[in-house]
């Protein structure tokens, strides 16, 4: 199974009440409803895009003909006064835009990049809906807020309740499959909240300029599962010894590594043979998965997933591949393996550590 992440080549927040302000270098992306300055209210929206050649390389050279899912993911940094229930929307952007070098706190405002009103800078193109199948929005009778494709087939939504987590995970598979990713994605609160609610609230997320492990990403998931056992037998002992092989300890950020899983009985039955019974490798059952955790934060950067982190198998044993480019460099990670044997769920982590280096 495979999971591959790429990170934005640009992102920014645009504010209806600062129609020419650029925030391209902010560490935070602001997706909020603010207190009304006039009868229309005020909002902020998020724009982000990914390198087209990277997306095309993944689709052509890594996924190939396999089916896949694609998700835009953002990780929450701060929230206040959020409602019990709300929905966000994600649309493919319909025109080019420039990230700029501004910050929200700059005085005077930086205007050399995308803003609520302009797609490039204060002397550039105004956001106007002139393409078929697109729309924009208005604030105080001024065009602004981005231009996006309106087809419901390309629109991703995510609803939040009081009990759900607040990180964003939007299914943009249809937009990617239809090549509506050229200019990236615009994320906004639903029309039922924007410019209408009398209860302001803030939801803020880490940007690509954050110095944490939480930048936004476009995550591809596809099924490359293969289970060919050869002459190997499936372990039945509920006390297996599971160790990680092919772990050099350090990996270049642009590398792909195939980790192998060695499996044996903790107390193998005695047998007449010329080699040690402790080197008889076995395999885990098909209901076995891997995960990757950041050691410092204890956060799962790749969580157990019954569809996309399933352990494959060949005549040498179980294995899985990790694309190191989807992990933050200069950090240490831990591999975990989960399996179910005889109705018991077993999770092995031991000292399965590695580091991604530049």
Image (tube, rainbow, N blue to C red):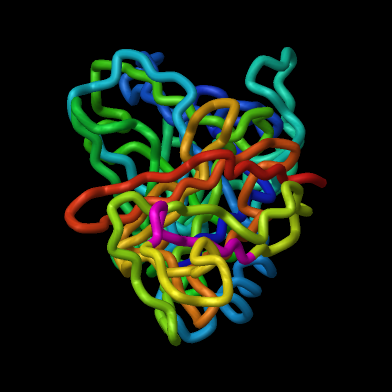
User: Residue 293: percent from the left, percent from the top?
Assistant: 52, 39
Residue sticking out furthest to the front: 272
- Residue depicted at x 24% and y 35%: 160
Q: Position of residue 153 (x, y in %)?
A: 31, 67
Q: Main secondary structure of the magenta part?
A: strand
Say if residue 172 shows up in the picture: no
The x, y position of residue 243, in whole percent, is: 53, 53
**At 47% from the left edge and 46% from the top edge, which residue is drawn?**
336
**59 or 284: nearer the viewer:** 284
Give the quarter of the image for residue 95: bottom right
Q: Is residue 266 magenta?
A: yes
> In this orientation, which residue lies closer to the viewer: 144 or 46?
46
Verify whether residue 219 appears in magenta. Answer: no
Q: Which residues are drawn in magenta?
A: 258-268
- The percent position of residue 74, horizontal first and vertical second, equals 47, 40
Residue at 26% across, 48% down = 345
Q: Nearer the viewer, residue 89 or 21?
A: 89
Q: Nearer the viewer, residue 174 or 303?
A: 303
Locate the N terminus and report the quarter of the image it occupies.
Answer: bottom left
């Amino acid at each position: 199974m495979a999971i591959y992440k790429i990170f934005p080549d640009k992102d920014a927040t645009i504010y209806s009440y600062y129609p020419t302000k650029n925030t391209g270098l902010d560490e935070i992306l602001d997706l909020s409803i603010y207190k009304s300055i006039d009868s229309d209210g005020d909002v902020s929206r998020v724009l982000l895009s990914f390198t087209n050649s990277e997306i095309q390389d993944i689709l052509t050279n890594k996924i190939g003909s396999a089916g896949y899912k694609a998700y835009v993911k953002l990780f929450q940094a701060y929230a206040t006064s959020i409602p019990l229930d709300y929905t966000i929307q994600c649309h493919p952007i319909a025109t080019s835009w420039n990230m700029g070098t501004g910050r929200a706190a700059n005085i005077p405002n930086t205007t050399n990049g995308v803003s609520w009103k302009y797609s490039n800078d204060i002397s550039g193109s105004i956001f106007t809906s002139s393409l078929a199948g697109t729309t924009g929005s208005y604030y105080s009778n001024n065009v602004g807020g981005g231009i996006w494709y309106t087809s419901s087939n390309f629109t991703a939504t995510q609803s939040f309740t009081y009990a759900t987590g607040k990180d964003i995970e939007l299914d943009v598979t249809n937009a990617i499959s239809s090549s509506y990713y050229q200019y990236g994605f615009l994320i906004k609160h639903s029309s039922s909240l924007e410019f209408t609610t009398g209860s302001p609230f803030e939801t803020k997320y880490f940007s690509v300029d954050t110095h944490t492990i939480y930048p936004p990403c476009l995550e591809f998931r596809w099924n490359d599962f293969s289970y060919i056992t050869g002459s190997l037998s499936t372990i039945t002992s509920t006390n297996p010894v599971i160790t990680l092989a092919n772990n050099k300890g350090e990996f270049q950020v642009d590398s792909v590594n195939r980790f192998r899983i060695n499996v044996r009985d903790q107390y193998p039955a005695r047998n007449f043979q010329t080699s040690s019974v402790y080197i008889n490798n076995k395999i885990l059952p098909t209901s076995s998965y891997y995960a990757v955790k950041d050691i410092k934060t204890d956060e799962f950067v790749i969580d157990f997933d019954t569809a996309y982190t399933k352990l494959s198998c060949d005549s040498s044993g179980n294995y899985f591949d990790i694309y190191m480019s989807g992990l933050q460099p200069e950090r240490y990670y831990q591999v975990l393996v989960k399996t179910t044997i005889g109705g018991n769920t077993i999770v092995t982590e031991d000292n399965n550590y590695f580091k991604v280096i530049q």
